[in-house]
Image: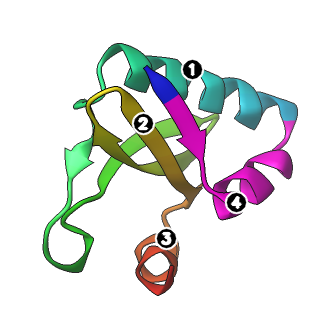
Amino acid sequence: MKVVQTGSFRRKAKKLHAAEKTALDRAVRKLVASPESGALKKGDLASIRVLKFKVKAQQYLLAYSYEPELLTLLAIGAHENFYRDITKQ
């Protein structure tokens, strides 16, 4: 399976601390193994899935889209304003 990152995802992931990057790597591996594990959204975000994972006590969300043999990582961030920022993209 091919994994592709958007530019905004790459910029945000680059700014993460080491513990956050480790948790992100685990989440991406989980998605590669089971791409339909994230929750499918409705309405304006109907084509997007979101996987939730924790780093220490903070919950992060990973937005992605999935097509057969292609996983596109769209956004990562804390829950606050996450969906608002995705709809602007």
> Answer yes or no: do the residues labelled 4 and 3 have beta carbons within 8 Å?
no
Picture quadrant of residue 48: bottom left
Upstream in the sequence, badge 2 or badge 4? 4
Amino acid type at mark 3: Phe
> In this rendering, is residue 33 above or below 65?
above
Q: CA distance from mark 4 to mark 3?
A: 16 Å
Task: Give me the C-alpha separation between circle 3 and circle 1.
Answer: 20 Å
Amino acid type, callout 2: Leu
Disc 4: which residue: 7
Q: Which residue is mark 3?
A: 82
Element under disc 4: helix
Dots 3 and 1: beta carbons under 8 Å?
no
Q: Residues within 10 Å of mark 4 (few under 14, many from 20)?
A: few
- Residue annotated with mark 1: 26
Foreground: disc 1 or disc 4: 4
Q: Secondary structure at mark 2?
A: strand
Magenta stretch in the rendered image:
3-17
Q: Residue at 22%, 46% (x, y): give it.
A: 39
Q: Quadrant of the N terminus?
A: top left
Residue depicted at x 62% and y 32%:
24
Q: Residue at label 2?
A: 71
- Would you say the residues marked 1 and 2 are in contact, meaning their CB atoms lie under 8 Å apart? no
**Distance from the alpha carbon under mark 3 to that under mark 2:** 20 Å
